[in-house]
Image: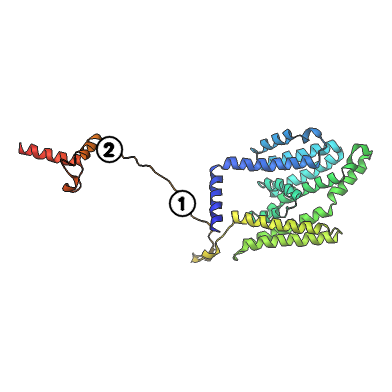
Amino acid sequence: MVQLLKIREQFYRYVGKYEVFVMAAVRFIIAFTAFRMINSVTGYMKLLTDYPFALILALLCSFLPAGLMMFCGAALILLQFFALSKELCAITALIFVILFCMYLRFGTRKGLYTMLTPVLSAIGVPYVMPVASGLLSQAYTVISVVCGEVAYFILKRVSENSAMFAPANQTSTKSILTFAATQILLDKEMYLYLIAFAVSAVVVFCIRSLPADYSHLIAIVAGIVIQLIVICAGEIYAGNPGAVSRVIIGCLLSLLIAIGVQFMTRSLDYSRVERVQFEDDEYYYYVKAVPKATVQMQDKQIKQIHVKRDRSRKRGNQAGRGSINEENFGGEDAETLEERVLDEFRDDD
């Protein structure tokens, strides 16, 4: 445990020293992964599916706020959908406007949650995001996670039914609008995940705010268990029991990731809990102080001291055998002894 704390302290020191470059690298990785996922799932506009475009856009977003990163991702999706169907692009644009309004009202400065959620959903571990939002911030920041999950399900449904939106299908505009609205707005699986995420974030926030020992760890386990129960029950009820195993594996991996996040951000040492009581003119206070788990890191600094000897001292040390010995005069150096002898001769004259 102590070794892990040392590694964490070294990590924080490194990040604090190069914070600007580290955060830019994190934004670049998230943006590039998200843009590549969008292009790989859609790929309807060949110009946007090339590597240089996603790379250049990710490099640009690494120095921009997370909100502009979200805007670039939404614009990329709309351009891909426009190449497939104008009606689909119009409905998706309307949904994105609603999501941006929700984000600006509740999820400001949590745009990385929105960008990271569809990426984790693509690899099967989105369950860590609502837990992280309830653990690291207020419960309403789960709105950012919800926006990212809605974008993921839109990409998923359009990819599964892309043939219905193709121009070669010769479907009328009204039929395309109806089909798009049905596939996107009436997606029961999407609403199931959104409800599970929202409930999990609220429960995690409420439990981690309690003054009980190990409340953060209990909140993480409770949030993952709630998502597991709600989503598995919904999948079984919808007649899709094959997804249960995938959900269980994803929840277990998300639990491990969430515990790692808790260790890096909210690790507390409950063996050194202190309780303090004090009062003022109006209230009597009971305070429980739980110190963070830290380890003292020693800064080893090596200083080199160079001693310069003057020539007179060297000559005095070399002639000390036949003339004057330092030990006989209480350890005084040769130069001081020479001055005393000269003073005595001057006094005699």
**Residue 83: which quarter of the image?**
top right
Drawn side of residue 39 relative to residue 26, left or right: right
Q: Is residue 337 left or right of residue 233?
A: left
**How far across and down, in percent of the image, does residue 80 sit?**
81, 38
Mark 2 belongs to which amino acid?
Answer: Arg
Using the rendered image of the protein, determine whether residue 98 is visible from the camera's viewpoint: yes
The single residue placed furthest to the front in the displayed view is 322
Image coordinates for residue 82, horizontal then vertical, percent? 83, 37
From the top left corner, tell me how far across and down residue 124 is, in percent: 75, 52
Residue 231, x across and y down, in percent: 78, 59
Q: Which residue is mark 2?
A: 309
Q: Nearer the viewer, residue 345 or 11?
A: 345
Which three-letter amino acid code belongs to the residue tagged 1? Gln
The residue located at (55%, 64%) in the rendering is 270
Residue 338 left/right relative to 213 = left
- Residue placed most toward the observer, 98 or 125: 125
Q: Which of the two marks, 1 or 2, is nearer to us in this view?
A: 2
Number of marks: 2
Q: Secondary structure at mark 1?
A: loop
Q: Quadrant of the N terminus?
A: bottom right
Viewer-nearest residue: 308 or 87: 308
- Mark toward the start of the polypeptide (1 vs 2): 1
Judging depth in this view, the residue of 60 and 195 nearest the camera is 60
Mark 2 lies on a secondary structure that is loop
Q: Quadrant of the C terminus?
A: top left
Apparent side of residue 339 relative to residue 176 in the rendered image (left or right): left
**Does 152 sit above or below residue 212?**
above
CA separation in Å, label 1 and label 2? 34 Å
| Residue at image mark 1 | 298
